[in-house]
């Protein structure tokens, strides 16, 4: 039995033009089956505005403070924080030069259309389960801001947050190369997982679809991330490792980005994979 698998893709921001540019902003956009990631390099005073966002979205301030406004609320968000923004009209005003990452569901149709890898999903991704939003927050929709340093634990490098429609894992940075004898290969059944690298060097090892029929298999991929890069796609088996320095440039394919957000804080990049049995969440993000 042949299983359709949407191709894994990578958006190498450092080597490709931005999808949206202004004098004070450059934004690279890539999508997955159920989500969209917009990475913006901004100057002080730049504004990122959503006029009529239908659902919640997430804002990761990598290295710049910002004023975030939604409805009648305004917060002063510090660098290295995550903010969940409610539906409706909202704006982000940069307080300096730096990088701002936003993660949306595919209800942000204008961003879906602008994605660098939109063609990969022209016929959908039938092997990915549809996004099923959670119930509205008990206290209603509002700005929710999280200082990442307050959510770091000694027993894990994961810092996981969820909204009504997405899950984001903002990983703590790895300062040394990962032990190649202790990687974490895993498979993804009906769930795309995207990796965004904003600093450092990473290599993602991908093998899919991992089925009993060898004729289904695609060639293994060893995707090296420069700075910045986004990688995504529908992989059924993968492992990833940071590298302290670039020892070699692995071939891999020049991909374009996709998948539900797993963010990995290496230099600008997005990758996508699948996680089996993920319950009602059909998208996630991670950032180290």
Image (cartoon, rainbow, N blue to C red):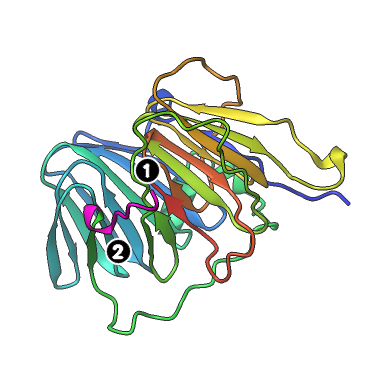
Q: With respect to residue 120, does 158 lie above or below?
A: below
**Which of the two residues, 7 or 117, is positioned nearer the viewer here?**
7
Magenta stretch in the rendered image: 149-157
**Main SS of residues in magenta:** loop
Residue shown at the point (11%, 44%) measured from the top left: 45
The image quadrant of residue 126 is: bottom right
Question: N-terminal of the two: label 2 or label 1?
Answer: 2
Q: Is residue 190 above or below residue 267?
A: below
Alpha carbon separation for disc pair 2 and 1: 18 Å
Q: Is residue 136 left or right of residue 41?
A: right
Instruction: Specify whether 193 is left or right of 285.
Output: right
* 172 in relation to 81, above or below: above
Relative to 139, is 248 above or below? above
Q: Viewer-nearest of labels 2 and 1?
A: 1
Q: Residue at x 14, y 48 (%)?
A: 65
What residue did someone put label 1 on?
288
Residue 108 visible somewhere in the drawing: no
| Residue at the (44%, 67%) spot, across then down | 165
Q: Magenta includes 163? A: no
Q: Position of residue 21 (x, y in %)?
A: 29, 36
Report x, y in % for residue 258: 53, 45
Q: Position of residue 78 (x, y in %)?
A: 15, 51
Q: Which residue is mark 2?
A: 84
Q: Is residue 228 left or right of residue 257?
A: left
**Mark identifier at residue 69:** none
């Amino acid at each position: 039995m042949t299983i359709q698998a949407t191709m894994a893709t990578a958006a190498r921001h450092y080597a490709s033009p931005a999808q949206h540019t202004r004098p004070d902003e450059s934004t690279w956009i890539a999508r997955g089956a159920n989500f969209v990631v917009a990475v913006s390099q901004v100057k002080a005073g730049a504004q990122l505005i959503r006029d009529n966002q239908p659902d919640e979205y997430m804002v990761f301030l990598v290295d710049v403070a910002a004023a975030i406004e939604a409805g009648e609320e305004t917060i002063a968000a510090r660098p290295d924080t995550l903010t969940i923004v409610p539906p409706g009209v909202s704006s982000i005003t940069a307080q300096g030069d730096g990088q701002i990452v936003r993660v949306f569901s595919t209800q942000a149709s204008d961003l879906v259309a602008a994605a660098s890898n939109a063609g990969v999903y022209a016929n959908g991704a039938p092997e990915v389960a549809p996004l099923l939003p959670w119930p509205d927050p008990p206290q209603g929709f509002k700005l929710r801001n999280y200082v990442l340093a307050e959510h770091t634990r000694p027993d894990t490098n994961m810092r996981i947050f969820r909204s009504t429609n997405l899950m984001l894992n903002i990983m703590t940075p790895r300062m040394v190369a990962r032990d190649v004898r202790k990687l974490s290969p895993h498979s993804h059944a009906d769930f795309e997982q995207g990796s965004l690298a904003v600093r450092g060097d990473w290599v993602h090892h991908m093998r899919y679809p991992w089925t009993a029929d060898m004729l289904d298999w695609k060639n293994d991929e060893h995707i090296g991330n420069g700075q910045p890069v986004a990688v995504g796609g529908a992989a059924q088996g993968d492992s990833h490792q940071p590298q302290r320095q670039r020892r070699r440039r692995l071939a891999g394919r020049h991909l374009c980005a996709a998948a539900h957000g797993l963010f990995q804080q290496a230099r600008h990049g997005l990758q996508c994979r699948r996680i089996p049995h993920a319950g009602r969440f059909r998208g996630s993000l991670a950032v180290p």
